[in-house]
Image (tube, grey):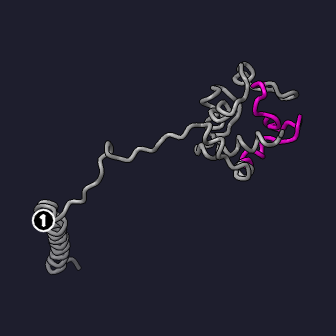
Amino acid sequence: MFDTMTLTKATAGVCSTFLVFLLGHWAADVLYSTDAHGEQSYVIEVASAEAATEVEEVSFEELMASADVAKGAKVFKKCAACHKLEDGVNATGPSLYDVVGRTQGTEDGFGYSGALAGRDGSWTAEELDAFIAKPSAYASGTSMSFSGLKKQKDRVNLIAYLDSLDD
């Protein structure tokens, strides 16, 4: 049952498998070695970070002047789940009717979090832009869970739309 020939065949099979793996390893080293190929035949040059073209800064007033109210209405769909546009109609968030120019934290019938209730000043276009960009950074501790709008063009269009609602 267990004779010398069976043991020889099993040993030969293990050694052959080991030999195939060693030859495969050697072939992979030869094919994929980075030292064996020498220098690169050509170099692709890329512009350095210092030589990158600078984007010219556009003032906030120019952005507001070029804002698109129709695009702002589309952006408002992200806000519509929590905010209403009717005067005095609050939902999860306060009514946004006549919000541009309104004193912060003063919408009748809405319970503001302490972070916004204690703020002074009014909702100017610049203040709204800063708030909509990232509410948690503008008013630390606010209960508004919205992460914000990253694109300034979207924020400007939204502010122009909100400002157009109250004539």
Verify whether residue 85 appears in magenta: yes
Verify whether residue 101 appears in magenta: yes
Left or right, 30 with respect to 158, comes to left
Secondary-structure class at tag 1: loop
> Split into 4 quadrants, where in the image is the C terminus?
top right
Q: Residue at x 19, y 65 (%)?
A: 32
Closer to the camera in the image, 82 or 20:
82
Residue 18 shows in this picture? no
Q: Amino acid at mark 1?
A: His
Residue 19's place in the image compared with 34, above or below, is: below
Span shown in magenta = 76-105
Q: Residue at x 32, y 42 (%)?
A: 50
Q: Residue at x 12, y 65 (%)?
A: 37
> Split into 4 quadrants, where in the image is the N terminus?
bottom left
Residue 57's place in the image compared with 7, above or below, is: above
User: Chief secondary structure of the magenta span?
Assistant: loop
Q: Which residue is mark 1?
A: 37
How packed is label 1: few (under 14 Cα within 10 Å), some, or many (20 or more)? few
Left or right, 100 with respect to 65, comes to right
Residue 22's place in the image compared with 52, above or below, is: below
* Figure disc tally: 1
Q: Percent x, y for residue 166?
A: 83, 39
Name which quarter of the figure residue 40 lies in.
bottom left
Residue 112 shows in this picture? yes
Name which quarter of the figure residue 112 lies in.
top right
Closer to the camera in the image, 6 or 47:
47
Q: Percent x, y for residue 115?
A: 69, 23
